[in-house]
Amino acid sequence: KRDRVDSNEDKTKLIKLQKPQKRKKKSNRKQKSFIEDIDKTNPLLEGFYKIQSNIFENRKTSNKPFYENELQNAESEYNEWLKVVKTPLPLTFRINRAHPKRANRLKTQFDTMIEDLDKEPIDMNDFYRATYSSRLNHLKSKDIVTEQESKEIEELTKKIEDLENKVIPLDPPKCMEWYPGQFGYRFNISKAIFKKHPGLKSMRSTVNAYVEEGMISRQEEVSMLPTHFFDLQPHHRVLDMCAAPGSKTAQLVEGLYEQSKHKDTFEDVTGFVIANDNNTKRCHMLTSQLQRLGSFFKSAIVTNHDATRFPKIYESDGSTVLFDAILCDVMCSGDGTLRKSPDIWPRWTPKQPLPLHKLQIGVVERAIRLLKPGGRIVFSTCSLNPLEDEAILAEILRRHKGVVRLSNQHDRLKNFEYSSGISSWVVTTPDNSILTKAEYLATPAQDRESLYKYYSESMFPPTEEEAKWMNLHYGIRIVPHYQNTGGFFVAVLEKQQDDSMEDDEVPDVKTKKGAGIRYFGELSSMSFEPIREDILQSASNLLDIPVSHLSQTLLHRLDKYAKSPSKSRAFPRRIFEVPPSFHSIALNPKNDRLVVVNAGMPLFEHVKGAQVPRSFPYRTSLPGAQSILHTMNPNRILEVDLQTFENLMKGGDQGQYWRDICLNEKLFDTVLSQLNSIRPGLIIFKLRSNTLADDFFVIPCSYTKTNLIVKQAKLNDIKLLQRQLVNDGLSSSS
């Protein structure tokens, strides 16, 4: 375009049209390496937990005796904790168990890889030597070396000398004995080693491919615990109050499907999971993460609300929706994640948890009001601080005595070490001086705001009489050195009786003047409409599903700028599939206060074109194809051989784009005869295989008289297909 600009006037116009390029900000972050440039010492942090030494007592394990060199007292436990939290966190991941066949096949594959690592161990000597040497050269190149860096230079030099003529075999991954079915794996190396070591390339590519496909989730081991205490059923309605980034939410969604009695169609899964977060950007990140669930994504609803003010939801008959299970993984200071996020070390202070105390209580209180009698709340934090753990539970039990109670779930932790909750702890000032309850109450009320800002009476431990009925020892604290994990606290609350929600509505969010749409931060609320009868009838003919069923699961989102349904599109841009139990909720006008970022799975997407059938001009996504495969008209499911299937997946630029395939191409001669007897519209290609009883290998497309519009696969999908075919005894052409 610049070559065709002749006059100065045209050049000026062109410059004005060009978008100004933003300068990239220089990052102030220090260069990353295997050994972090972070001072992992903090006198305030170390002093605080030395004062709270009783959290290291009452160490327990289930179905397993303590190891021989068991730590005998709180002081030695504290020293071991302080040593371990300065080391990197091991890599852990789990396999999605909702698809039993695929999960078992994948577990067999990983167990085989682990056996191979046992037979031929990888020597880590060269890797450690190169890593230490790189760090050592970096420190020596500095003009000014601090005292701590001088010590590190001595330590690195000694480590390099110790590696001389020494074989260091890689410790292969091991199954987590406590995880159901042993579908969780613990790899006692850091994430950095797993990403960089050349000997782990095959396992690394396998894990990455299955993460994209949704069959594997990389997740910290202690983060897998909270959902372990729910007994989820396919019809349950679940709320995750503080959901982002979404690893626990994914577990909750999978939990609905694990108990399904119909593993092919999952037709009995009618429940849903609402994943809530108060940050708009984190909500979009949460949606992106949950999309990896594939066809299970239809059971996930993402909302954007302050958890302490989550609104009431109404059924179509006007009754209030109460949840069967609620997860309160509340905001906290995060001192349990020191190994994963070492940047917490220099900035942690004893006053960090104080402003969060009331918020944490508010989240759990709101959850109690939204929970049905007999339901369960799992409360968790990634902090070991009693002010964020037992103090919250004590105040909740105090305010709602007789309504909720703590439930003893220690028996569920088979082969897992933990400490039970405590009933006595110490409250400290920002400089780690001890503050007693008597001293706090003796301070005049007008002076408390200045002397003890953010402190409250609820932070202090309960009385002896209260401690007897509160049963705070039912709580579970995981200390990092017990099993080489992060720090965590979890407890289970059960609702015994109804806590009426009458006149309990939280104030509405602000309305943008004259817009006709409510706004919450940057995000507009999501309004839905039922699908028109003629579109439902066409979909029914295509999918071979009764209209009555489709009308209870399909809906579309109103145009953001359309003030009335009459101004919406003739054909909705996207048609979403949602669980039947949420369908009536979404269409209830009383729920217009619910700010929904995403509801369900986009099942159909509108297609434009002269040859596209006008009755149903839609195509579907890969998760959508997997969802409707067992209910779709069998005449529109075409089985093809491996060569044709791979040709459909490849071609053009890599990326998630739709592309046209001319039917005259020689590659698809075998497809033409099958297409001649089918009317134009939506079709699904399925890999013909006698060994693969798997619905993952399908390709959706839109068929016209002259071409196919196919969703092109990502490179990871192709590699995953080829790897899976080899694992199942089939050969790939490439």
Image (cartoon, grey):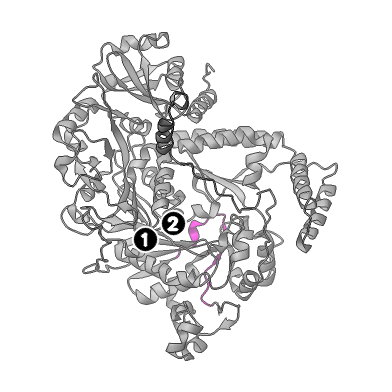
Note whether residue 472 is visible: no
Task: Return the residue nearer the eye: 559 or 180.
Answer: 559
* Residue 720: percent from left, percent from top: 51, 29
Mark 2 or 1 closer to N-term?
2
Placement of 401 over or under 479, stated as above or below: below
Q: Are marks 2 and 1 in contact (CB under 8 Å)?
A: yes
Which numbered tag is attached to residue 229? 2
Q: Which residues are magenta?
A: 408-424
Placement of 520 over or under 598, stated as above or below: below
In which image quadrant can residue 493 be found?
A: bottom left
* Residue 256: percent from left, percent from top: 36, 46
In this figure, what is the number of numbered marks?
A: 2
In which image quadrant can residue 419 be found?
A: bottom right
Which numbered tag is attached to residue 207? none
Placement of the N terminus among the 4 image quadrants: top left
In which image quadrant can residue 607 be found?
A: top left
Q: Residues within 10 Å of mark 2 (few under 14, many from 20)?
A: some
Amino acid under disc 2: Phe
* Residue 478: percent from left, percent from top: 56, 61
Q: Secondary structure at mark 1?
A: strand
Q: Is residue 416 covered in magenta? A: yes
Placement of 356 over or under 180, stated as above or below: below
Can you identify the residue that label 1 sits on?
A: 376
Placement of 617 over or under 56, stated as above or below: above
Amino acid under disc 1: Arg
Q: CA distance from mark 2 to mark 1?
A: 9 Å
Left or right? Give the position of 8 relative to 589.
right
Q: Is residue 680 covered in magenta? A: no
